[in-house]
Image (cartoon, helix red, strand yellow):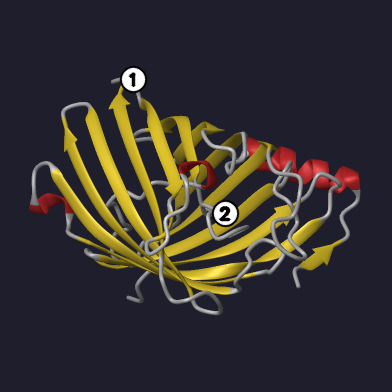
Amino acid sequence: MAKRFGLHPFQAALMLVATNILVHTSAQAIDAFEIEVYDAAINEPLQPSLELHYNNVLEGHTVPEYPNEIPPDHLNHLTFEPALGITRYLEVGSYLQFVIDSHGEAYWAGAKLRTKWVVPEDTWQHWRLGVNFEVSRISHEFEPDAWSSEVRPIVGYETGRWAYYVNPILDWSLSGGNGVPDFEPAAKIRWDTGIGFGIGLEYYGDIGQLNAVPAVSQQQHYLFVAGDLLNGPLELNLGLGYGLTNASNRWVIKLILGKALPRPRRSP
């Protein structure tokens, strides 16, 4: 059961305002806590960082799809992601996840651990390759199966002002189901405006289990118009997404805000 925190409505409002300033449900559902296409960038060795992920389901499903689910309509998903570079090709991180509903109630929604392996960016001029592994424990109110794991290949190509990334994600339930993964592709295309930010499109989907792909209307597909701050002191991604099928939530907004933290000082 998710742990509920009794926030006063004013406190909840302040928390949401601060978030904006600083910045599956069923077998076919994208990760509501991390709407992001991974690139192959990682922290330098011993470089810590912190990211804040926030998204709000402006218009979504209002009827539970399994017992005890809290429907996603008007839910605010808030995730804190600390990470640490280990080597030039390895980074580790975690996700601490919370939900605030439309009544101002806050819930602890679970946690994830991840390792991200990449080919160093200076290996090739244009290609970017990597893979991310995750294991998660999510509260039943937000996922039907508590334990799950994810394998996320990362394939990218950057040339001139254009960047293209694809994440053909496989997601396994570790505490239910039949052991067959869901296929959850994600992709991104971005154009660098040359004035400090990039604009583009992001796609997220859940096709379903590979041995029994449902009809397209029962799959989730989202298209986001998104923007990124490039080469600034902060990592910033903003997006507005539209659900393309009946199984998808209709409108979602998202924000990712990241900051590299000071490295620990070495003893003299």
**Measured from the top left, where is residue 88 in percent x and y?**
22, 63
| Quarter location, residue 179 | bottom left
Crowd class of label 2 (few under 14; some 14 to 19; many from 20; radius 10 Å): many
From what the image shows, is residue 161 above or below residue 105?
A: above
Asked whether the viewer can see residue 99, the reply is yes
The front one of 71 and 225 is: 71
Element at badge 2?
Answer: loop
| Quarter location, residue 192 | top left
At 88% from the left edge and 43% from the top edge, which residue is drawn? 10
The residue under label 2 is 33
At 53% from the left edge and 55% from the top edge, which residue is drawn? 28
Q: Label 2 amino acid?
A: Phe
**Quick check: 22 left or right of 260?**
right
Numbered badge on residue 181: none
**Measured from the top left, where is residue 209 in percent x and y?**
43, 62
**Measured from the top left, where is residue 45 in percent x and y?**
29, 65
Q: Label 1 amino acid?
A: Ile
From what the image shows, is residue 62 above or below residue 153?
A: above
At 70% from the left edge and 43% from the top edge, which residue is drawn? 61
**Quick check: 240 left or right of 92?**
right
From what the image shows, is residue 146 above or below residue 224?
A: below
Crowd class of label 1 (few under 14; some 14 to 19; many from 20; radius 10 Å): few
Numbered badge on residue 195: 1
| Quarter location, residue 89 | bottom left
